[in-house]
Each structure stands twice: as C-alpha cells, then as structure tokens.
Amino acid sequence: MKIVLLDALTLGDSDLSEFDYLGEFTRYDITEPEQRLAHISDNQVIITNKVVIDEAIILANPQLKLICIAATGMNNVDLLAAEKANVEVKNVSGYSTESVAQATFAMLFQLLHQQRYYDAYVTQKQWCESPNFTHISRPFTEISGKRWGIIGLGDIGKRVASLATAFGCDVCYFSTSGKNNQSEYQQVDLNTLLSLCDIITIHAPLNEQTQDLIDVQALQLLKPGAIILNLGRGGIIDETAMAVALDTRDIYHGSDVLAVEPMAQDHIYFNVQQQHRLVLTPHTAWASSEARKSLVAKIVDNIISWQGRNA
C-alpha cells in the first residue's frame, strides 16, 4: 500500500515515522493545486490537511481508496464524489481541545492586560527612566465576575466554559445550529449574548449559519470594553466591519483565523489605527506539540482501522 502526505509543512516538526510502518510512505511539504495529480499518482491513501481533493482529482485516481483529513473540518474534500467513487474519507476530532482552550486564554490575557504595551515599555527602557516604581497607564481589569459568552458550545467551547467558570466568570452560550442544549450553562440568543457579555469567544464551524455571523449590526451591539475572540473559523466575522469598529468603538478583538489564509499583504487589519485593540496569530491555536502528536496518532489509527476492514 502506498501512502502520501500532501502538506507535511502544516504539521510542523511532528514525528511522522509511524506512517513508514503502514506502507510505502511519501511526504511532500507543500502541494500546489497543479501538483496534486503528480503527487498523488498511484497512491491508495492520501493524507491532506488543507490540500483540496475535488471531484476531478478523485476521478483521475481510480486507485484511490482512502482520504485521511488531518483536521476536523471536511470542506476541502468533495464528499459526494468520494462516496460515488467508493473512496472512504476519515477526519480527526478531539485532538486540539486543550490546545485551543489554552490559546483562547493566552489571547485574552494579551488584550486584557495589554501585555504587548507593557513589554515594549520595559524593553525600550522607558521603565529605567521612570520616577515611579510602577507604570499603569494602560488600565486592565480582572476576569473574575465578568460575563463570558461562548458562540459554539462543542467540545472546545465546553472546555473554555469550564475554565472561564474556574476563573469566576458567569458563562452563557449561543448555539449556532440551534440544536445544542446544555443545562449546565445558560443558553441565550445571539443579540443577548453580544449586548451583555464582557468577553465573547467563538468556537464554531464555518457554515451557512455562521458565515458573517458577526457583521456590522452585530458589532454595534457590543458593550464598551468588550473583548471578542475568534478561535473558530475565518469568515464568521466580517473583517472589514471589525476593522472599522476597532477604530471607532471601544472594543477589542483577537483572532487566530482569517477568511483567507495565509493573510494577504494588503489585509484591512494592517490599516487599523488602534493596533493595541487587536491581536492576531497565524492559525496556531490548534497546534500545540501534544495536539499534533495526538493528530498524527489518530490518523494512523484511521489507516489501521481501514486496513483491518479491507484486509
């Protein structure tokens, strides 16, 4: 059996040696769209994180039997075409819960405590020239007692909720599907969540219900000083509307995801004047060393399980 990993660079320095025991394993750091046919060639198993596997690719590879997605989202594979071609598709879930929850709080504290400003104050030796032992020109508050709203209460949202509760927050949530009903936390409608919460975190998938969920009108509902973090998917927040809001309202935003990734050179966030209200990370929340190790192990399990069923 031949196995190919199409975008190994997305997994960083993860140990991929387990794949060598499963068959003839080939890895490519990056696979551009025009390289897909050549890279897949006669492999029976594809591993892809973000490389798109569409109907044309599936039809051009009749030897293909299994597509392993190195992520939870499955929007990069034409599932209907795979089903018609009798190609099994397996994703991975539950590997990044702790990593994303931790990243949520790391991002929150950067904004809440204005760490970037205070770090610069020290490294630029301004503290050395201060007549005072302390410097608190950028006020910060405590999260204890704050109202924390979660958009998307799946596994990650629930983990964030439990940590927020441990910090003394009053947690509520909005179900983007309308089907989630968790008695442990108060369920509210979106407008209520946006207007009442001090901290709002997004842990939802991108779909028809969540596309541009946080638009111009939604941003107008935020209370002064509110912090809104997107650890879900780009496209949930209207980035143009957010850029305007950051310069015109007293709100703060952090995001690990954008509608188009990698980030464009002329992205509107680079034009935000109030940069102290904005923190961005390059889609890293999922990628702790432990999470990536778990991800690889789950992909290996998926391949072994498939092999067992097709022996």
Image (cartoon, rainbow, N blue to C red):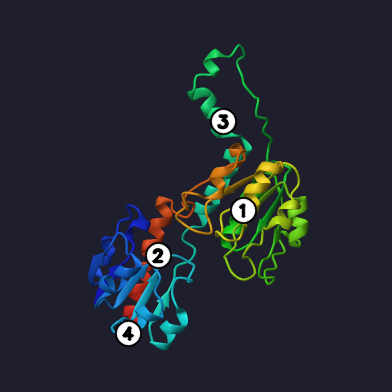
Residue nearer the viewer, 256 or 13: 256
Q: What residue type is labelled 3?
A: Tyr
Label 2 residue SS: loop
Give the position of the C terminus as an image quadrant. bottom left
Q: Where is residue 173 in the image (x, y as percent from the top left)?
A: 70, 59
Residue position marked by numbered label 4 in the rendering: 310
Structural distance between the alpha carbons of marks 2 and 4? 24 Å
Dot 3 crowding, Cα within 10 Å, few <14, some 14–19, many 20+:
some
Q: Where is residue 175 in the image (x, y as percent from the top left)?
A: 68, 65
State the residue position of label 2. Answer: 49
Q: Which of marks 2 and 4 is in front?
A: 2
Q: Residue 240 carries which label?
A: 1
| Residue 224 in which image quadrant | top right
Work out how far the residue at label 3 is from the one at label 1, CA to CA, in angstroms: 25 Å
Observer-side mark, 4 or 3, equals 3
Judge from the rendering whether residue 199 lies leftward or rightward of residue 12; answer left or right: right
Q: Please give left or right for residue 54 compared with residue 141 in the image.
A: left
The amino acid at mark 2 is: Asn
Query: What residue is shown with label 3?
Result: 117
Of residues 25 and 265, the one drawn nearer to the viewer in this rendering: 265
Going 67% across and 58% down the picture, which residue do you hit? 214
